[in-house]
Amino acid sequence: GENVEQHPSTLSVQEGDSAVIKCTYSDSASNYFPWYKQELGKRPQLIIDIRSNVGEKKDQRIAVTLNKTAKHFSLHITETQPEDSAVYFCAAFFWGGGNKLTFGTGTQLKVEL
Amino acid sequence: GAVVSQHPSRVICKSGTSVKIECRSLDFQATTMFWYRQFPKQSLMLMATSNEGSKATYEQGVEKDKFLINHASLTLSTLTVTSAHPEDSSFYICSARDRVLAGTDTQYFGPGTRLTVL
């Protein structure tokens, strides 16, 4: 089955700096890669996603890049703010196979003032 | 937007009792619902996939007789933790896929249920 690795497990940045979280996946058939933000005790919130026919996608301060050849994708947050502090999960999905999301291990992002 | 609710949000029970958690899609019909378990500071682990009107598909290592899943309608799926033990204490989250968007990969997550077994 699919295996998703995520790094780093914790990330501390100063407000205004950029944050980058990286994930690798094992199943080359995976074709959908969402990123979720989860605050303590709450549901995961989809913040951005990318499909395998696209290399990069941007939404304001958030961007995701995908390298299908290397089987890795990354989340980029620019101009970080304290409210960006949360746990971020990447995930991979294979439509037509297991039809289920496989999550990465999560990154605790802390944005310090 | 699509909303998924869960009830209860928190539950505390004694060891050996059973607990039922409901997952509802409020403004859409869900042909498929997913149940996840999340331990503190860990990722979401898929327990089972439930399709309306059919038996749930459980992930490897998940005991189907302990975690009973019923998806009797297009808007409701239930997870029953039978004979709960302290090690079952966890955050249980459901998600649902919109029937209209059945050919897509979008999932909507519920707010989760915090189960504590004493």
Image (tube, coloured by chain):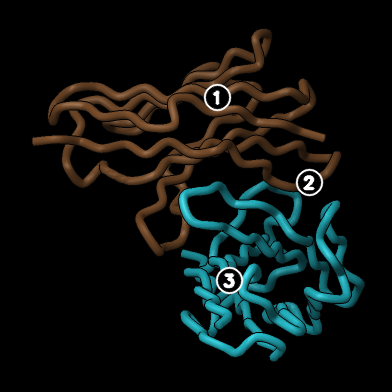
- Observer-side mark, 1 or 3, equals 3
Q: From where the camera sits, is residue B80 visible?
A: no
What residue sits right under mark 1 in the picture?
A23
Q: Which tint is chain B? A: cyan
- Observer-side mark, 2 or 3, equals 3
What residue sits right under mark 2 in the picture?
A99
Q: What element carries label 2?
A: loop
Q: Residue furthest right?
A: B54
Q: In the image, which lettered chain appears brown? A: A
- Observer-side mark, 2 or 1, equals 1
**Quadrant of the frame with the N terminus of chain A:** top right
Q: Which amino acid does label 1 sit on?
A: Cys
In 3D space, how far apart are the residues under numbered discs 2 and 3 (Cα atoms)? 27 Å
Specify which label sits upstream in the sequence, 2 or 1.
1
Direction from residue A75 to residue A78 in the image, left or right: left
Q: Where is residue A8 in the image (x, y as percent from the top left)?
A: 43, 25
- Which one is in front, B90 or A87? B90
Q: Is mark 3 on a helix, strand or loop?
A: loop
Q: Position of residue B103 (x, y in %)?
A: 75, 50
Disc number placed over residue B89 in the picture, else none: 3
Question: On screen, B72 above or below A58?
Answer: below
Question: On screen, B32 above or below A49?
Answer: below
Q: Position of residue B40 (x, y in %)?
A: 48, 56
Question: On screen, A21 above or below A46?
Answer: above
Q: Which residue is drawn at 59% across and 13% down?
A: A67
Q: Which residue is drawn at 43% across and 40% down?
A: A88
Q: Which residue is drawn at 61% across and 41% down?
A: A103
- Which one is in front, B15 or A51? B15
Q: Which residue lies furthest to the left in this view?
A: A113
